[in-house]
Amino acid sequence: MSVNKEVKRVTTHTLQKMKLAGEKIAMLTAYDYSFARIIDQAGVDVILVGDSASNVMAGHETTLPITLDQMIYHASSVIRGIERCFVVVDLPFGSYQSNSEIALASAVRIMKETGAHAIKLEGGEEVLDSIRKIVSAGIPVMGHLGLTPQSIYKFGTYEVRAREEKEADKLRADARLLQEAGSFALVLEKIPAALAAEVSRELTIPTIGIGAGNGCDGQVLVMHDMLGINTEFKPRFLRQYLNIAEQATKAVQHYVGDVKSGDFPNQKEQY
Ligand code: KIV
């Protein structure tokens, strides 16, 4: 893997150029300072402070409970750990759906209180006014179509979306609308690979896929899933690069054994 060291800071402009050059965009979630540092230095282009923090950091079943204050806490921790990455923060459920004024106020809080570079929100036509309003205030917006976890109780299932032509057509139309409204990029979650590839070809802004195949302009995964911190979630689209849960369990068991046996601390480990 080669990291483009010439890029000091990734910006929306960088991402646009990557799409044009056919260079894939690597995006990963992070929620704290220490992992953000590792991810930034490992060459990831975009960090998403996802509302998946609700699941993997707070242990909730869905992304719905996380608050704007909690997202701000996670995002400001992430920002302190990065030098090169572009940082996008999810607007949490309830912080933008009511109207575009509230959406803008939430986005402004994120930008002011965290130092992040952009926000992401879920939905198509129904959130267009909010996207326009936020973009016109100078805040870059990433869209999110397909499986949108904040609507899980409407969908009723985490199954692949837009398999049916009617839903696929709506997704195509929404993607165009989001681009026209000024979004700088678009997450496509859990939709058929052929549809994601078609949308990616048609749009001029980059698409970032998760469970949407190889035809997207970039990919995103939840850090806890790909590092094997959270081992219960094993969808087909996930590639698990490490099994931290197993390694950490062994290390902690080792530590407990050393404490119980009196082996830790030894003479060199005391003053
Ligand atoms: O919250 C999140 O982590 C996300 C990704 C799954 C795209 O929205």
Image (cartoon, rainbow, N blue to C red):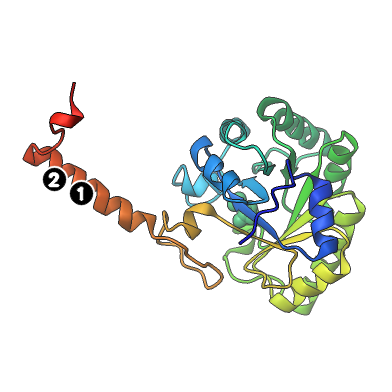
Residue 109 position in % (x across, y down): 71, 28
Q: What amino acid is labelled 2 in the image?
A: Gly
Q: Which mark, residue 253?
A: 1
How crowded is the residue under tag 2: few (<14 C-alpha within 10 Å), some, or many (20+)? few
Residue 138 visible in image:
yes
Residue 151 position in % (x across, y down): 65, 55
Tag 1, which secondary structure?
A: helix
Q: Residue furthest top?
A: 271
Q: Is residue 61 left or right of residue 117?
A: left
Q: Residue at x 13, y 30 (%)?
A: 267
How crowded is the residue under tag 1: few (<14 C-alpha within 10 Å), some, or many (20+)? few
Q: Residue at x 40, y 62 (%)?
A: 232
Residue in the foreground of this view, choosing between 208 and 62: 208
Q: Determine which quarter of the picture holds residue 114.
A: top right
Q: Determine which quarter of the picture holds residue 152.
A: bottom right
Tag 2, which secondary structure?
A: helix
Instruction: Say which residue label 2 marks.
Output: 257
Q: What amino acid is labelled 1 in the image?
A: Gln
Give the CA distance from mark 2 to mark 1.
6 Å
Residue 148 position in % (x across, y down): 66, 57
Residue 111 position in % (x across, y down): 73, 31
Q: Indicate the quadrant containing the C terminus: top left, top right, bottom left or bottom right.
A: top left
Q: Residue at x 8, y 36 (%)?
A: 262
Q: Is residue 50 left or right of residue 177?
A: left
Residue in the foreground of this view, choosing between 13 and 185: 13
- Whether pointer 2 and pointer 1 mark residues with C-beta atoms closer than 8 Å, the reply is yes
Q: Residue at x 69, y 75 (%)?
A: 192
Q: Is residue 34 left or right of residue 119?
A: left
